[in-house]
Image (spheres, helix red, strand yellow):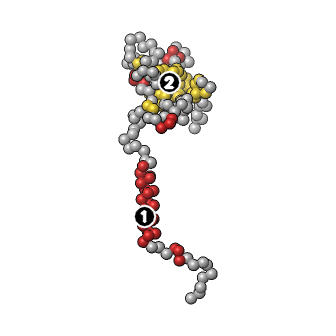
């Protein structure tokens, strides 16, 4: 038998203590992974919550159903067609952005896009109008991600265009900069 010129590898022999230490380490890793899993009861309809500064209770996004929108519906109710939440101004408190139109029953009523924040009372406060219903626009592809509001605005080039079929489209984003929401037009997707 030839002797090895390498150092003695006796420390690589396993003992029951080694196996016990390995099993304990694996159990700790699995337990930690279980604690970091998302809440299985959370869903898209669950209100968005963020942790406020200094470890206080999580902030809840404003509920648009409790808001009073600057929308003249001539006696009809207003409808919140879409809503999304996110921290738009970086204050660690979520805002809600709502797409709202009058409940016209038929046709395509124009929509407004409003930013809501917590009010001093139970009702949220409208702090910005991103799209005024007086502009006659409909909203599609609406989202809030990473503090940016995005939407596709659908409109009409003239009164002669049927209200069912918008013939103008503009993809836009709004982002909070310098104390105001700055609107940016996004490039239209290239036709494939």
Observer able to see residue 148:
no
Circle 2: element type: strand
Disc 2 versus disc 1: distance between alpha carbons? Answer: 52 Å
Q: Is residue 63 above or below residue 9?
A: above
Q: Is residue 16 above or below residue 140?
A: below
Circle 1: element type: helix
Residue, disc 2? 115
Observer able to see residue 60:
yes
Q: Nearer the viewer, residue 45 or 92?
A: 92
Residue, disc 1? 23
Q: Nearer the viewer, residue 166 or 124?
A: 124
- Residue at far top of view: 74
Kindly indicate the quadrant of the structure image that contains residue 173. Answer: top right
Q: Is residue 54 above or below residue 185?
A: below
**Viewport quadrant of the N terminus:** bottom right
**Tag 1 or tag 2, which sits nearer the N-term?**
1
Task: Indicate left or right for 27 with 185 as reference.
Answer: left
């Amino acid at each position: 038998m030839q002797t090895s010129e390498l150092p003695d590898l006796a420390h690589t022999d396993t003992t029951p203590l080694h196996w016990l230490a390995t099993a304990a380490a694996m159990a700790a890793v699995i337990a930690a992974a279980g604690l970091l899993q998302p809440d299985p009861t959370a869903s898209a309809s669950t209100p968005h919550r963020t942790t406020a500064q200094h470890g206080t209770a999580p902030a809840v996004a404003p509920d648009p159903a409790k808001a009073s929108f600057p929308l003249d519906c001539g006696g009809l109710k207003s409808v919140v067609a879409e809503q999304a939440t996110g921290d738009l101004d970086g204050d660690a408190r979520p805002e809600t952005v709502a797409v709202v139109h009058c409940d016209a029953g038929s046709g395509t009523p124009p929509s407004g896009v409003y930013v809501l924040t917590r009010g001093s009372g139970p009702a949220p406060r409208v702090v910005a109008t991103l799209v005024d219903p007086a502009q006659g626009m409909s909203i599609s592809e609406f989202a809030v991600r990473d503090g940016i509001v995005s939407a596709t605005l659908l409109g009409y080039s003239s009164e002669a265009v049927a209200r069912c079929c918008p013939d103008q489209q503009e993809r836009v984003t709004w982002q909070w900069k310098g104390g105001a929401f700055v609107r940016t037009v996004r490039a239209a997707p290239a036709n494939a």
